[in-house]
Amino acid sequence: FFAGLTGFYAEDYNTAIALLEEAEATGTSDAVLYQFLFEGYSKTDRTEEGLKYLKKGRETFPDDSGLLFSEINYYLAKGELTQMIANLEIALEKEPENASVLVTLGQVYDQLAVKAKEAGDQEESDKNFNKSLENYSKALEISPDDFDINYSLGALYYNRAATYTEAMNEAANDFSVAGNKLYEEIKAEMDGYFSKALPYFLKADAVNNTDKNTLIALKEIYVRQGDFEKSNSYKDRLESIPE
């Protein structure tokens, strides 16, 4: 068992796997044994082969955080969002102040909101958007100066605003009174989301003033608000960042 752990830390994963499997066969039972067996297989591009150890470890040590997060990362890589939610909720019960778990939940619900929108289910999209917002907001309460959290909240609103573009363009082609009214209504909703995104991008920029995606978002938001002076200032900053 200890030789296997040593092999893992030395990044000799094949040796580690062989030793840890031998230890497991003799009856050694430890949460980290199953975690490192699964991760050892993953490091050697045999993730699915090692999945049996992750499942056995989770069954044997259901309260172990290391195994839980290994399982979360597995489903994250697979893109199996629904299964991830269940595991993340469990992780949150164990560590309610873990901002990373809240951010990951926010990301999962954000992806589900996008998928529902693409499928034409606006109600489901709205529900998942609100859950994403809720989790990001809780994470921000824990770490208000975190760049990733502020950026994620800004991006959530920004991307939501962008979903109105197609409908707004369609309404723009209808020159009737009703068409003009619909255009203004859609534009107002879109502009509202861009405005909500702005303070989070400004905060993200204050934390990290060299992030290109943040500068692009700020440049575009100010263009939409008609503030070309501010937009150009972000454009200049963007162009000054080395490739």
Image (tube, helix red, strand yellow):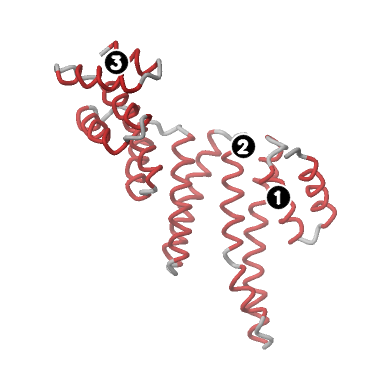
Query: Quarter-wise, where is residue 84 in the image?
Result: top left
Q: In the rendered image, which residue does mark 2 sit on? A: 147
- Residue type, label 3: Gly
- Residue furthest right as drawn: 229
Earlier sequence position, callout 1 versus callout 3: 3
Identify the residue position indicated by label 3 in the image: 4
Residue 215 position (above or below residue 130) = above
**Front-most of 194 and 48?**
48
Three-letter residue code for mark 1: Ile
Please state the total of marks drawn on the protein image: 3
Q: Secondary structure at mark 3?
A: helix
Left or right of residue 48: residue 165:
right
Q: Residue at x 39, y 31 (%)?
A: 95
Res 6 → quadrant: top left
Task: Please name the residue shown 36% across and 39% down the image.
Answer: 74
- Mark sitting on residue 193: none
Determine contact: label 3, label 2, CB under 8 Å: no
Residue 241 position in % (x across, y down)? 76, 39
